[in-house]
Image (spheres, coloured by chain):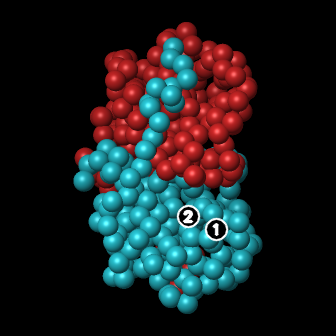
Chain colours: A cyan, B red
Amino acid sequence: MSILDAIYQRRSIREFTDESVNREELLEIVRAGIWAPSGLNNQPWRFVLVRDAKIKERLAEQTRYGYIVRQAASLIVVFLNKDIMYDAVKDYQSAGACIQNMLLAVEAVGLGAVWLGQILINKDKVREILTLPEGLDLMAVVAVGHPRHRNQKSTRNELSNFIVKEF
Amino acid sequence: MSILDAIYQRRSIREFTDESVNREELLEIVRAGIWAPSGLNNQPWRFVLVRDAKIKERLAEQTRYGYIVRQAASLIVVFLNKDIMYDAVKDYQSAGACIQNMLLAVEAVGLGAVWLGQILINKDKVREILTLPEGLDLMAVVAVGHPRHRNQKSTRNELSNFIVKEF
């Protein structure tokens, strides 16, 4: 699959089959994530991989999108290491670049995923469930699995609406 | 070029030939940007395209990486529209996802680019030069052009260093 096809065809997948995702696939996805750029190449991203059903259930209870978390075969929980961060805005941007790489890699390996942000409302609780130190700041949960279908539609405004000026 | 190849082979390009970049190429790159995900699909990104040498020179003076800005045939200046933002962390992440899509699209069309963040130190001045309203918050300048070479190297720490836990 070409880059541009992946970028345009990628959709948030929220319904999954119960087929599992193997660890190697998850590692390939995370590897794509860490090849995102970061300011000063500080590589501030950290990850927790979750395939255990009990932990998944406890995380599901922390978001109104619990039904997605429960269905997904695996979760990639994304953090920033506060000790490595150097500029909040740029590090958040880099987290976004990392997550986008992972979503595109998910397409490349034929899986589906959705970027879950609403769970940030319970980020301390998530850290507690995963028994992580305070130095890790939750950025997102990426739910990964085998898509039940690929009917999901998405839209964007007209390109011209985004281009404010040209010089 | 496949997704994973683009992700792994992409490098920051800081030296460009003087060949120009046409408007259609820039639009294709920005179009890839707006197909990034955003929270609530709020699509908060805005762009200014710069190919004019005088404006480029004035922007160059706002960053210690002016020599890159001067060399690049064109700039994509990326903003968030504050009126549309709904959650700073998530909107900054979405800006990062958008920029990453653009960097990958640059690879797809055979150009080179670098993500410049240091210029944020003068973000008000940049807005002034581009005669933009206060509601636009500078996120980055993406310098785009024809690579003078592709010798740039980059490294990442071992994947295992990023994976904190597995359940």
Looking at numbered disc 2 in the image, what kind of residue is underneath it?
Answer: Leu
Question: Of A16 and B61, which appears nearest the observer?
Answer: A16
Which corner quadrant of the image does residue B59 belong to?
Answer: top right
Labels 1 & 2 near each other (Cβ < 8 A): yes
Question: Of B33 and A28, which appears nearest the observer?
Answer: B33
Residue drawn at 37 percent across, 66 percent down: A112
Label 1, secondary structure: give it. Answer: helix
Residue drawn at 51 percent across, 61 percent down: A115
Vertical comparison of A107 with A38: above or below: below
Task: Locate residue B120, reporting x and y percent.
Answer: 67, 34
Task: Locate residue B19, reporting x and y percent.
Answer: 34, 18
Using the image, tell me which numbered label, if any, was put on residue A116: 2
Question: Of A35 and B109, which appears nearest the observer?
Answer: B109
CA distance separating discs 1 and 2: 7 Å
Residue neighbourhood size for the residue with mark 2, other residues' Cα within 10 Å, grouped as few (<14), some (14–19), many (≥20): some
Residue drawn at 33 percent across, 82 percent down: A19
Task: Locate residue B166, reporting x and y percent.
Answer: 52, 82
Q: Which chain carries label 2?
A: A
Residue tagged by mark 1?
A119
- The reply to whether residue B158 is visible in this rendering is no
